[in-house]
Image (tube, rainbow, N blue to C red):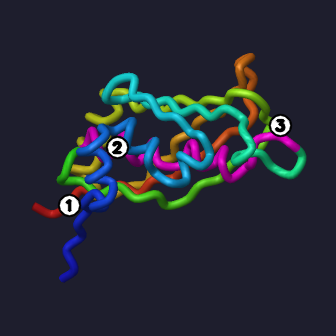
Amino acid sequence: MLKLKQDVFPRWQQLSDQFGTEGAFEHFGPYAGANIKVRSIDPYTVESSMQLIETNTNYVGTHFGGSLYSMCDPFFMFLLMRNLGKNYIVWDKAASIDFIKPGTGLVSARFHIPPEEIENLKLELARTRKLEKVYECSVKDEQGDIIARMDKTLYIRKMRT
């Protein structure tokens, strides 16, 4: 029987060990090239931001959609992996993004999974062993207007012990 295992990719582990969590993202190629900055608020909350620069600008001079998606991509998975621990597997399963209005200047997104939800997931996974969960985030401009909204579906599974 195939035993599922989830380890942090060695390059990520090296970057995290050398630069810390926030610094690891700054040295990750797609984030460095798109000028994406990451800040951990607490163990359950992360923020990402991106200033409009030449390397993240699209054909008409606004934020490139791929960069907007990229600034949102890993954080719900990251938060669940960090807070559930090594006895759980978390995988991205699906995502969708709606572009509400063109983004210019500084844009940001906040990702939060409350501790109570982590505990509820553990209880549910003790019963069902696997589930899918959808999380939503909004990318906002400096005025607080939503410029994009992303839904992220995560597959979460308790490993056999």
Residue 64 seen anywhere in this rendered image of the structure: yes
- Report whether 156 appears left or right of 69: left
Q: Which residue is mark 1?
A: 159
Give the Cα separation between the discs numbered 1 and 2.
14 Å
* Residue 157 in view, yes or no: no
Residue lying farthest to the top in this orientation? 143
12 horizontally vs 134: left or right: left
Q: Dot 1 surroundings within 10 Å: few (below 14), some, or many (20 or more)?
A: some
Spot occupied by residue 77 in the image (x, y as percentages of width and height):
41, 48
The percent coordinates of residue 79 (x first, y second) are: 36, 40
Q: Position of residue 5 (x, y in %)?
A: 23, 66
Cα distance, mark 2 to mark 3? 30 Å
> Relative to 5, does residue 75 appear above or below in the rendering?
above
Q: Could you say which is closer to the camera, residue 100 or residue 10?
A: 10
The amino acid beneath tag 1 is: Met
> Which quadrant is home to the N terminus?
bottom left
Question: What mark, if any, has residue 102 been given in the picture?
Answer: 3
What segment is highlighted magenta in the picture? 61-84
Query: At label 3, which amino acid type do we have?
Result: Pro
Whole-Å distance between the Cαs marked 1 and 3?
A: 42 Å
